[in-house]
Each structure stands twice: as C-alpha cells, then as structure tokens.
Image (cartoon, rainbow, N blue to C red):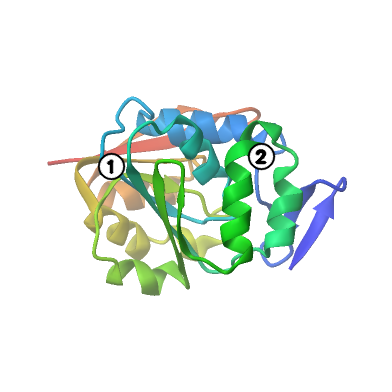
Amino acid sequence: MLEWRDGALPVSTRFDDPYFSLQNGLEETRHVFLAGNGLPDRLRPGFQIAELGFGTGLNLLATALVAQVPIRFTSFEAFPMAGDDIARALTAFPQVADVARPFLQHWGQGALAFQIGTVSVEVVIGDARDTLPLWGQKADAWFLDGFSPAKNPELWGADLMMQVGRHTAPGGTCATYTAAGFVRRGLAAAGFAVERRAGHGHKRHMTVGTLLA
C-alpha cells in the first residue's frame, strides 16, 4: 500500500499521505516529538513513551539516539510497513544508521518486542481504538503521529484522545505536528492543558499538552 515519491519518500496509498515530512522528517521528529515533550531532558530510568503511528520507526530511532538511561517505548500501529520498505525509507536519514541496523534486524525477524540501545520497545499491532484501551501502562510522554487528521480521522477522534488521557501518567505530556481544532479540543476534553506552538518547516503550528492534575 505504498508508492514512492521522487524515489525516496514513502506515501501511504491508503491515506494518500507521506510517512514523514517533506522538509527533513528527522528534524521534524526532533522539533515536534522530542522538544515538544521536553525530551531528552525529562528522561529518567523507567520513563514510558507511547506513540500512535509507528510508521518507519523514525521517532523511535531519534529517541534511541538521545536516550542515555533505560526507558520504554510502546507504539500502536494498525498497518505495519514491510522491513524492506522501512529500510529504503530510512536511507534518507544516515544520522540514524547506527540504531537503524539492529532495529531492521529485529523487524525483519518479525519481532514486536526488542531492545534498541537503552530503549525497550514494544509495537502493538491493530487498530488503536481497540488496542489502547487494553494497554496496562501509562505514558509519561505521547507522540501523536498518525497520518493527517483530514486523511485519517479515526486516529484523532475524541474517544481515542480520551483513552490517551486515561493512559497518561500524572503530569505527563503529549505532542503532535497537527494543530487541527478538533484534535486540540479532544485533548482538552481528555484532561490536557493544550498549547499551540510554532510548527516545523512549512507548518505554522503544532500542538503540545500537559495532563492536568
């Protein structure tokens, strides 16, 4: 369900949306998901990151590059990419090559739970609307990285945002590249203090949130 734009950018034909930013996806990950959640400064042993939308694994790899203590990373993905496609996509980011190699080896073997550096990884396959309510953990930081809300509204609905809130530790945070009004309202209804910040590249705004006590 992929097509390749300019031979290097994977685009989901299901959602008609690219898997990462046209303006340097790694820098967008660092700006939106890491800086948006105050990372890596907040990382401590046992810190739990959760993600909606695993995609190419780029967010995981960017996290693994900066994680100096043992942390956990759980990602919810409905349509996992084939290993060969992920490998092709990640050639665009030579900066992550050292952590991409062991990841691709695990992924190619069909592993959904594995270790990358100090990061213990679990990828939960299935519709997050079904799988997240069954998750027994709470995240200290959320990466909300589904396809565009206009293309993939199921991953941004109010009920799922409520589940994100329920699966967030006290004082936990979330960040996403989108500033869509219904997403911000859904996060606010789920208990987050929501803030709009400057986005990455051509995107004027992004959204961050902190769970209220």
Give coordinates of residue 208: x percent, y percent: 38, 36
Q: Visible in this render: residue 20?
A: yes
Q: Quadrant of the N terminus?
A: bottom right
Horizontal relation, residue 43 to residue 91: left or right? left
Q: On the rendered structure, is 209 left or right of 151? A: left
Q: Residue at x 63, y 47 (%)?
A: 101
C-alpha distance separating marks 2 and 1: 27 Å
Quadrant holding the C terminus: top left
The disc label shown at residue 21, or none:
2
* Quadrant hosting residue 167: bottom left
- Decide: marks 2, 1 in contact (CB < 8 A)? no
Q: What residue is pinned by disc 1?
A: 47
Which residue lies at the image location 65% right of the left edge and 44% below the top edge? 20
Q: Amino acid at mark 1?
A: Phe
Residue kind at label 2, given as amino acid type: Ser
Residue closest to the eye, 109 or 132: 109
Q: Is residue 148 above or below residue 202?
A: below
